[in-house]
Amino acid sequence: MMTSLYGAILFLLWLLLSGHYDPLLMGLGIASVGLTVYLAHRMDIFDHESFPVQLTSRLPAFLVFILREIVKSNIDVLKRILSRDPNAVSPRLEEFPLPQKTDLGRVIYANAITLTPGTVSVELTKDSVIVHALAKDIADDLFTGEMARAIPDKVVEP
Amino acid sequence: MVLDILSWVCLVAGGLVGVVGAVGIHRFPDFFSRQHATGTTDTLCALLILLGLGLQAGLSLAAFKVALIFLFLFITSPAATHALASAAVHSGLDPKRGRTDSEGQS
């Protein structure tokens, strides 16, 4: 079931990327998709982590949320770069608890932290993440702000 | 015409964000804080430039490819940033602490 869905997505991607619709090339495309799916199936790499279809319905809301966070934190970091105030930048390492229960949820959360400028996740352990933040209020924001509140609901416990 | 203007606004703004990000790499004090400066070029700069290019392409296969580039960039760039930061910590690079918790030392 998951295998055929994977094949269908791959073939759609092949069509959109190549832009060729004549029989010979489409046949070659189908053959290469078939080979890829066969290899992936033999290697037994389909599971909820490598191919997280269960997240698809929540993806649009998550994308809108993360894009808004990215734009907001970008503007903040750009201001700090151009600021003459020496206190605009005071980097620190801090440890945050991870509310997610699954590995996939934790990785998505840590990646979301890294993706928003001003915070980089340095190390991920079983129940916490060590974050390098550009300034104290950015770190505090991660504790209390939108990210801490919204990510556990929006992302996705399979 | 409107699309052209919009796309140029995006391209120019993206370029500006990239330049400011580069300034940040020089102004910030250590490796870890510089990563935040490159983070802006990774995200907003790439976002604006790809959006501008997508508007130039219109509704076509090229626009779809631009969207794919954007998607892959957003998955791979935090992984690369995290790998760099993690490698730096593990090889013993100590991050500079802010003024509030290490007054007077440097």
Image (spheres, coloured by chain):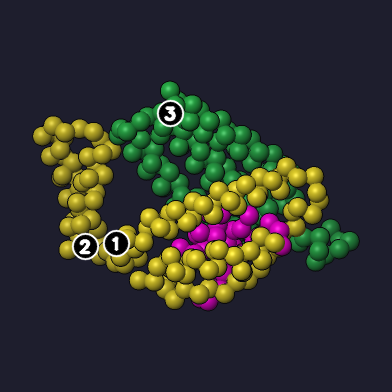
Chain colours: A yellow, B green
The numbered disc on residue B3 is: 3
Which residue appears at 55% of the width and 68% of the height? Answer: A148
**Above or below for A98 versus A27:** below
Is the C terminus of chain B in the top left, top right, bottom left or bottom right quadrant?
bottom right
For the residues beneath circles 2 and 1, the answer to whether they share a chain is yes
**Above or below for B15 versus B31:** above
Relative to residue A41, is residue A114 drawn left or right? right
For the residues beneath circles 3 and 2, the answer to whether they share a chain is no
**Above or below for A74 versus B22:** below
Furthest residue toward left:
A23
Q: Which residues are magenta?
A: A108-136
Is the residue marked by circle 2 packed among few (<14), some (14-19), or many (20+) residues within 10 Å?
Answer: few
Amino acid, disc 2: Met
Relative to residue A97, is residue A59 drawn left or right? left
Q: How many marks?
A: 3
User: In front here: A36 or A93?
Assistant: A93
- Closer to the observer: label 3 or label 2? 3
Q: Are marks 2 and 1 in contact (CB under 8 Å)?
A: yes
- Provide the chain ID for the residue under circle 1: A
**Above or below for A19 versus A85:** above
Alpha carbon distance from label 2 to label 1: 9 Å
Q: Nearer the N terminus, badge 2 or badge 1? A: 2
Amino acid, disc 1: Val
User: Which residue was labeled with disc 1?
Assistant: A53
Location of residue A119 by image quarter: bottom right
- Closer to the observer: label 2 or label 1? 1
The numbered disc on residue A2 is: 2
Q: Which SS class for mark 3?
A: helix
The numbered disc on residue B62 is: none
User: In front here: B36 or A65?
Assistant: A65
- Closer to the observer: label 3 or label 1? 3
> Can residue B79 be seen?
no
